Amino acid sequence: MVKPIITVEHLFAQYGDTQVLKDVNLEVNTGEILVVMGGSGSGKSTLLNHMLGLKTPTSGTIMIDDVNIFNAKNKQLRNLRKKMGVAFQGGALLSSLNVADNVRLPLEHNTSLDTQTIDIMVRMKLEVMNMADTGHLMPSELSGGMLKRAGLARAVIMDPKLLFFDEPSAGLDPTTAVELDELILTLRDAMNMTIVVVTHELESVFKIADRVVVLFGGEVVANGTVDDIKNSPDERIHNMINRQPNTHRDDGEVYFNRLLNKDKD
Amino acid sequence: MNIEIEKYNNYQVIKLYGEVDLSNSRSIKLDIIKLIKSKNNIIVDFTHLQYIDSSGMASLVEAFNEAKENDTEFHIVGANGSPLQVLQLTRLNTVFNLADSVEVVGNNG
Ligand SMILES: Nc1ncnc2c1ncn2[C@@H]1O[C@H](COP(=O)(O)OP(=O)(O)OP(=O)(O)O)[C@@H](O)[C@H]1O
Ligand SMILES: [Mg+2]
């Protein structure tokens, strides 16, 4: 049995009075690509932000590499962060620095390697991302696909064992999206990375996922292989895969009460 | 991580064991560059290397450059598993002189 590197248990999160995550439980096994999939507003980014320790839940725990991230010591968290890379949606590069300086930032902050070693590492990672000779460009000079790849280069510059990637292929043309998917698979295979991808792009899910967790209204409604998801009898998942709007609606009386703002019960 | 250095014909063979990463890549680089500066031909033996990160690979690129500047030989042999995949991913397999074993290089040099 493979040991999970991430365990999420009974995670509840809310913004104000709104429950956004409702009893989320999941595990990420070492070396796998887990895709968290779900419609807009289903809670994907909220879940990701909790796994990164950027948000504190109402209740529940997340263990990463045997560290409980919500009550760990600062030093433990710092050590953990060095093993984690994050590629945010849109790349999240600093606009005042060129590509190479963006990519090298984590090395400057966390290591005492020689400048030449860092230079070579940066060029190597840009080469892997198919971005050779772009180190001197400013983020404003990059296309959407290049921004994502530059963000990915920065995310993996420390060779993290755990990579989080928010919406890798959203907003990209199909060819660029496929290239990015290939890159994710290669990183897992060659660097033994464990990768958590958040996306609503179905093609990408089916191509890269070892396992899929489907969120719906903040709840995990499925957790299985791509085939499990494709063959799911759940109407909500079926609709999601076939790009049907969600037809599972309240009945007329509930709607009527809502229109008149009547208390339900 | 463990490193053994021994002579084989005209070469100094650097055998890497275990994992090369941020914690040791710089000192390995300095060891190798020292040997190169005293005009030794180098074989870096990856046979027992389980993992090498990009700081390790970059350090070997620097050592290779030092060898070129000193007109000495620099070979990597026995790459397998994850280190071989990293060589391919980074396309450094097109940069380094790769061979199967110490003997293949050492008996022809
Ligand atoms: N900062 C916030 N304050 C209040 N509500 C929020 C906040 N962030 C998110 N929400 C709400 O939480 C719910 C889940 O949002 P989340 O961003 O996690 O969804 P998502 O699955 O990432 O959606 P998308 O695919 O559109 O990015 C939504 O109903 C959203 O309105
Ligand atoms: Mg989101």
Image: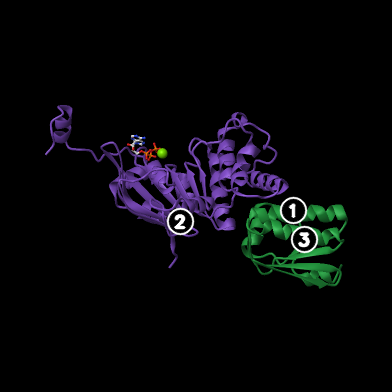
Chain colours: A purple, B green
Same subunit, labels 3 and 1: the answer reads yes
x, y percentage for residue A197?
A: 46, 47
**How far apart, in angstroms, are the residues tagged by discs 3 and 2?**
41 Å
In percent of the image, x 62 and y 44: which residue is there?
Answer: A108
Q: Secondary structure at mark 1?
A: helix
- Residue of label 2: A210
Tag 2 subunit? A
x, y percentage for residue A101?
A: 64, 38
In percent of the image, x 88 and y 56: which residue is there?
Answer: B71
Ligand 1 quadrant? top left
Tag 3 subunit? B
Q: Is A197 in front, or is B32?
A: B32
Q: Earlier in the sequence, mark 3 or mark 1?
A: 3
Q: Could you classify mark 2 by the number of other residues whose Cα lies within 10 Å: few (under 14), some (14-19), or many (20 or more)?
A: some
The answer to whether the residues at label 3 and label 1 have Cβ atoms under 8 Å apart is no
Q: Secondary structure at mark 3?
A: helix
The amino acid type, in three-letter code, at marker 1 is Val
x, y percentage for residue A236?
A: 30, 45
x, y percentage for residue A178?
A: 54, 44
The amino acid type, in three-letter code, at marker 2 is Asp
Tag 1 subunit? B
**How far apart, in angstroms, are the residues tagged by discs 1 and 2?**
35 Å
Same subunit, labels 3 and 2: the answer reads no
- Residue of label 3: B32
- Residue of label 1: B61
In the image, A173: left or right of A253? Answer: right
In front: label 3 or label 1: 3
Quadrant position of residue A119? top right
Q: Is B91 in front, or is A242?
A: B91
